[in-house]
Image (cartoon, grey):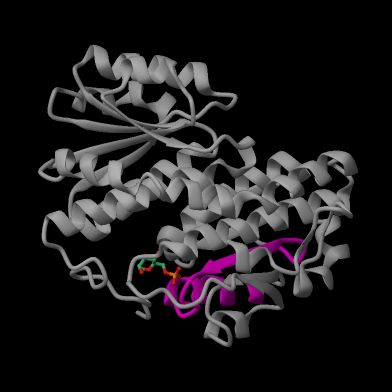
Amino acid sequence: VRDCLRGRIYPNEGRVQLGGISEFAHKLKNVDRIIIVACGTSWHAGLVGEYLIEEYSRIPVEVEYASEFRYRNPIITEKDVVIAISQSGETADTMAAIEMAKEKGATIFGVCNVVGASIPRLTHAGAYTHAGPEIGVASTKAFTAQVTVLTLIAFHLAQQKGTLTSSKLTELLTELDNIPQKIEKALQSEGLIKEISAKFKDSRNCLFLGRGSGFPVALEGALKLKEISYIHAEGYPAAEMKHGPIALIDEEMPVVVIATKNSSYEKVISNIQEVKARKGIVLAIVTEGDTEVRKMADYCIEIPDASEAFLPLLATIPLQLLSYHIAVMRGCNVDQPRNLAKSVTV
Ligand code: F1P
């Protein structure tokens, strides 16, 4: 995240400088709609991007699985801007989605990790994440770096459109500048996370719940657990629980809830009550110093307090560590999970 921010944010001047993307500032300022295409973890980062871009720039955003988008007949025009996100830069589905959108005249931006990979070469402009190569197959630091770039894109668009006051932008950029230290602090919970992992390692299923930008974090937490520890996991918007997944909750179902202090805090508390009333086991990701959720949840992991915009960057860390430790305890190869390829090129 620190490398991703370097040379791109100027908190004292209240501005974001985004290289390749700045050349298309005019196009972006007047865009009617942004379509984000990606697969897997990158798609989850895209969802965070949707929440942030819509919140701060008020530009409508759609997020599509490239693997589905490429096979249907979506409406795309030359007025559209497509943001393609990929860690490897070689994912065949994302490449096919780009080719299709390009043929229909859309402008394509890439958010990619690997310099000079195929996807950046297919795009009109873009931003590298500067996360460095992922050692394992499952995306981890690529996710936080993609989210960082998308946060910068959201702020950049808001700057272009004037939808954020300069004092608010300065405030957000100053806070973003301090996020790497907060991530370091979040990493200090590793000992506790290891202890909790020992309790969860034999679970057959796991539910992840979040609201707002905590929802894509829940999806990503579930995907990491599936990918590296082979435990069946589902991520849901917490408010959707009553529309189906609540039927699954019993004393054997661990439910991981993103319950940090933000605008949906009170509502998340009632979701936790619903889970506890059905004897589910709750692991809550909470804001440092929280006392209310602690009274209800079976386990709590604290993350530093931050504005809602930065919640995905912080709340993802304990979930990645949780999946990692559970996978190690189950004897899984975390770097090379079965059946998964680093770049899905077919
Ligand atoms: C997308 C992705 C990864 C996942 C696995 C398979 O790749 O779904 O998110 O962890 O490696 O591919 P990419 O387009 O982001 O490289």
User: Which residue appears at 43% of the width and 18% of the height?
Assistant: 291
Q: Is residue 326 left or right of residue 321?
A: left
Q: Quadrant of residue 259?
A: top left
Residue 222 position in % (x across, y down): 32, 47
Q: Is residue 74 visible?
A: no
User: Which residue appears at 64% of the width and 36% of the height?
Assistant: 307
Residue 315 position in % (x across, y down): 46, 43
Q: Quadrant of residue 206?
A: top left
Residue 126 position in % (x across, y down): 68, 73
User: Which residue appears at 27% of the width and 52% of the height?
Assistant: 323
> Is 5 in the magenta?
no
> Is 97 in the magenta?
yes
Residue 340 position in % (x across, y down): 26, 70
Q: Is residue 127 left or right of residue 240?
A: right
Q: Is residue 326 above or below residue 282?
A: below
Q: Quadrant of residue 338?
A: bottom left
Q: Is residue 80 left or right of residue 184?
A: right
Q: Is residue 27 visible?
A: yes
Q: Is residue 140 left or right of residue 168?
A: left
User: Which residue appears at 57% of the width and 83% of the height?
Assistant: 115
The mark tally for this picture is 0
Task: Give the magenta-colored segment's residue range.
Answer: 77-103
